[in-house]
Image (tube, coloured by chain):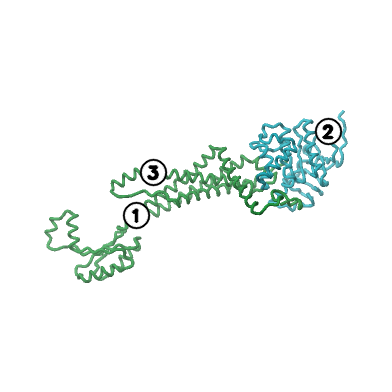
Amino acid sequence: MSILFSGRAAGASSRQIHPLQRWLMFWVQHLRQCIGSLGELWRTPLASLMTIAVLGVSLTLPTTLHLLVKNVQSISGSFTQAAEISFFIKDDATDTQISTLVTMLSADPDIEQVRFISKSDAMAEFQQVSGFGQALQLLDDNPLPHVILVLPRHTQPQAAEQLRRRIEQERIVDFGKLDIAWLERLDAILLLMRQAVLAIALLLLTAVLLIIGNTIRLSIINKKEEIEVMKLVGATDAFIQRPFLYTGVWFGVFGGLLAFLVVELMVWWLEGAIGQITDLYQSHFTLMTMSFSEFLALLLLSVLLGLAGSYISVSRHIRAIEPSGP
Amino acid sequence: MLTFDQVSKSYPGGFIALDRISFELAKGEMAFLTGHSGAGKSTLLKLISLIERPTSGRVLINNVDLKRIRRSQVPYIRRDIGIIFQNHRLLMEHTVFDNVALPLVIEGFTGKEMVKRVHAALDKVGLLDKVRCLPETLSGGEQQRVGIARAVVNKPPLLLADEPTGNLDPELSKDIMRVFEAFNQVGVSVLIATHDHSLVARMRYRTLTLKQGKMINDGLLQYEEPL
């Protein structure tokens, strides 16, 4: 398109070309600039590597913390037994009353599982576990109450607490006991950790944004001469910007991959040590690594950061460079 | 083709670079723009290539008032004007081919068509054999000719040159001028700013002379043999 010379068909449009071909050429152009900016990174390997390393390391920390939270959550998730509620039955309750209650509770939609432990069962278990076997036989009658153990369907502290209060209303129930204090604490700690991860991640990502912006700014200044010439021969700002934006994207891609590799390496390294600890506690805990969707999210975040960082500086600095004279 | 209508340009601080300049360059005409350094030659070229805007008056190219041109349209204007620089302004890390192809790449050319045009432009300036060289390995005159090839590769109707022979010896200057004449003969309007009076007088083209921002001569320059 020529503004000055209406008769003069300028540029590639001067030839009669199919729209599809023009559309293809547009993408060929993009691809060329995309690969070109990769070559540009290759030409300044040290500076590029440093920027990529900064990006990678900055992303590693939030990613690691995220994995940590995820693993702790999975551990706390396996402690659903902890939310078990014990209901102690009054001494004067009859067997029918108890069995009615058990049936009723089994049908309750909020309850996952109900287990009845009779006085005598409890005594037998206590004798076995406590080591007071001989001494207990001296007792005239069994002092232990009947107990109904209830496993709530919803194991969150509030839901469990609500259920406890509701069932406590039953006539034959003396009182219910739910040890939720430590569950609440664990939840609070997890929440704190998640918020800390978010705050740290935000800080680091801001830093990354600024670092990439600055790196791109420097490379724009380095190419001031070239940009001026391009402007003088009729390049639009968008055309000049594109290679720098692609550079940001490449920083993102490589930085994200680096972060992924570092995290995987760290997990692999820690796995042995964690295995030893869990062996000592005789539990079967396997460290959860990054899932594929998490990997993609990390990469996407990293690419977006690179793009945003370069956009911030490109949009200001390329506009500012104007040729000073022929 | 190119019209200046009472154009003035003053800079902050009160310096008047151009003072009510009026002239017209016809389609297919070739003219020189002379004057001492600081007379306003560069400013005049800057107004045409939209690097600067006039303080008052109108600059028209092909009857389009450049005042109408928005910032975002400036690149498209520059694609219609071939500009040749005194210090040639080549990209030193890129080959001769890449330098000449730059305006075509910007306009979206690819593949064979681009190669064909670059080779045609380099052929016109006689540098087809240097297509893979880096500009650094070329002589001053050759570098200037690469600059010319870049300016004409997309066949602009108007060609501006700012001191194209500034650093060259008379023999090379003559060669460069012949290249310009060749383009002029195929219908391109050419405006060459230079302070090389002897060259201007010998070539016998219309000459616009600036002195302290004013136009003091428009027409053939009388050549006076130095005593």
Write down the chain letter for disc 3. A
Q: Residue at x 64, y 37 (%)?
A: B94
Report whether A255 appears left or right of A82: right
Q: CA distance from mark 1 to mark 2?
A: 93 Å
Secondary structure of residue under mark 3:
helix
Q: Which chain is cyan?
A: B
Q: Residue at x 45, y 43 (%)?
A: A261
**Decide: marks 2, 3 in contact (CB < 8 A)?**
no
Question: Can residue A322 be seen from the camera position used here?
Answer: no
Give the amino acid at mark 3.
Trp
Write down the chain letter for disc 2. B
Mark closer to the observer (1, 3): 3
- The residue singled out by tag 1 in the image is A76
Q: Position of residue A110 (x, y in %)?
A: 33, 66
Q: Position of residue A251 (x, y in %)?
A: 53, 44
Name the mark on residue B198.
2
The colour one sees for chain A in the rendered image is green
- The residue singled out by tag 3 in the image is A268
Quarter of image, res B170: top right
**Decide: marks 1, 3 in contact (CB < 8 A)?**
no
Name the mark on residue A59.
none
Judging depth in this view, the residue of A191 and A41 nearest the camera is: A41
Give the amino acid at mark 1.
Ser
Report whether B123 appears left or right of A146: right
